[in-house]
Amino acid sequence: MLINIRKNLVKLIFNLCLIYSFIHFIFPSFALERNESWKDVLKKASGQTIYFHAWGGAKNINSYIKWAAGEVKKKYNITVKHVKVSDTANVVAKILSEKNVKKNNNGSVDLVWINGENFSLMKNNNLLLSEKWIFNLPNAKFLDFSNDPSLLNDFGIPTDGMEMPWGVSQLNFYYDTKYINSPPRSALELKNYIIKNKGRFTFPQPPDFVGTSFLKQILIELIADKNLLKLKYVAQQHEKELDTLWQWLDEVTPHLWRRGKNYPSNYLAITELVAEREIDLGMAFNIAHASNSISEGKLSNSVRSYIHDKGTLANVHFVAIPYNSSNKTASKVFANFLISPEAQIKKQNKDFWGDPSVISINKLSQKWKNKFSTLPRGLATLTNEDLRMKLEEPHPSWVKVIEDKWIKKYGSSN
């Protein structure tokens, strides 16, 4: 009996040693293999050139992309060509055209800065790299996908791992405190302000992104049932829901800058009008825009930002790889760099871009936590607490309807 107990004990110890050996040696080998696979990715990407199609209308954003391209060139020997675009819809159209002529490889677009309706169009037309590639990037560990659903949803459409979150944007307004004590903080207050201060307000001409976003902001504030905006637009069911927006515009349009006969082309043109005192209120989707403009000497030091009392439109913007990208591997490496703490802190820095980071501070080392916490904030940049009231984007199907109907009603003569 004692002999059997000893034999069983020896057998148990032997088995435990085997298990220990398995854990100690096999699992690290898996980790090593995983590290080696990313090394293989870097090796394969070395020497490749990618064409990054991104909006090119702002000097600070262009400078940031140029910096990021330079870093990736130094670190990984990847050349990034910034293809400056004025409307991402044109990029989507180009990729769709390539698909129609069966150019399924060696496409002209390797990586695109995208969100909203353009993402929805690409997803619906199978124009995106379908593998859930974003979760395989090493720096994805800094994104809190579990607790922040906005990182995996683009205007309410699940991203299915096909686009990498790159930054956070929120519609904000700004004014000069020298001339205005208290700006309007709701759609109703704004309507009254416009009527009382003729010619002192305007917005970018849709389909400019900020111009369309402003129309969505007004609609969200006025519509009786906001949940309807989460649904796909169906004309028979939802056309009347837009009446509150058109009624608001009917009342204010004759009192806009240039009587609503002309509109600025984008938010940068709005900044010039504020600086020249032609209008009182500006708007942008970058929360640091007013501060950046002050630093560049375009706006007065007395300019300050604000949002409406019940919140403003907020969304995440992304980068995505088209299904027919010529250099998918190098595009993944560049996307991985864009969400690194190094790239994200520079992007959030007011002196470079001022765009809020998508990475979770809680997932960073203490060193990086300290760096992010000590970032200087611009004179006119709102705090996270100031920006806590956020409004969800409507379903992308509402966007085209709003733009087309606005052009037909108010923009056809411009």
Image: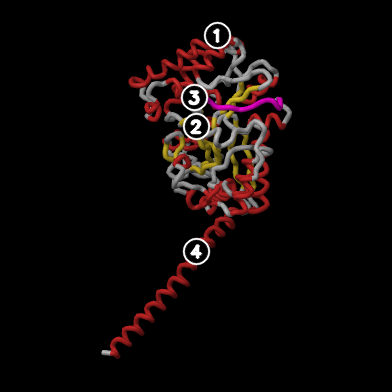
The circle on residue 389 is: 2
In this rendering, the label closer to the viewer, 2 or 4: 2
Q: Considering only order in the chain, which callout, 2 or 1, is on the residue closer to the N terminus?
A: 1
**Which of the marked residues, 3 or 4, is nearer the chain's N terminus?**
4
Amino acid at the residue labelled 1: Pro
Say which quarter of the image contains residue 236: top left
The span shown in magenta is 300-309
Residue 238 vs residue 290, the one in the foreground: 290
- Disc 2 marks a residue whose amino acid type is Met
Q: Using a 10 Å C-alpha cutoff, classify the residue at mark 1 as few (fewer than 14 neighbours), some (14 to 19) or many (20 or more).
A: some
Q: Position of residue 74 (x, y in %)?
A: 68, 52
Q: Is residue 245 above or below residue 62?
A: above
For the residues carrying marks 4 and 1, which lies nearer the camera in this image?
Answer: 1
Residue at the spot of label 1? 254
Q: What SS does tag 2 mark?
A: loop
Alpha-carbon span between mark 3 and mark 1: 20 Å
223 on left or right of 110: left
Q: Nearer the viewer, residue 37 or 110?
A: 37
Q: Are marks 3 and 1 in contact (CB under 8 Å)?
A: no
Q: Position of residue 374 (x, y in %)?
A: 65, 45
Residue 327 visible somewhere in the drawing: no
Whether residue 50 is visible here, answered yes or no, is yes
Residue bearing mark 4: 31
Between discs 3 and 1, the one toward the N terminus: 3
Disc 3 crowd rating (10 Å Cα; few below 14, some 14-19, many 20+) is: many
CA gap between label 3 and label 4 equals: 47 Å
Callout in the foreground (1, 2): 2
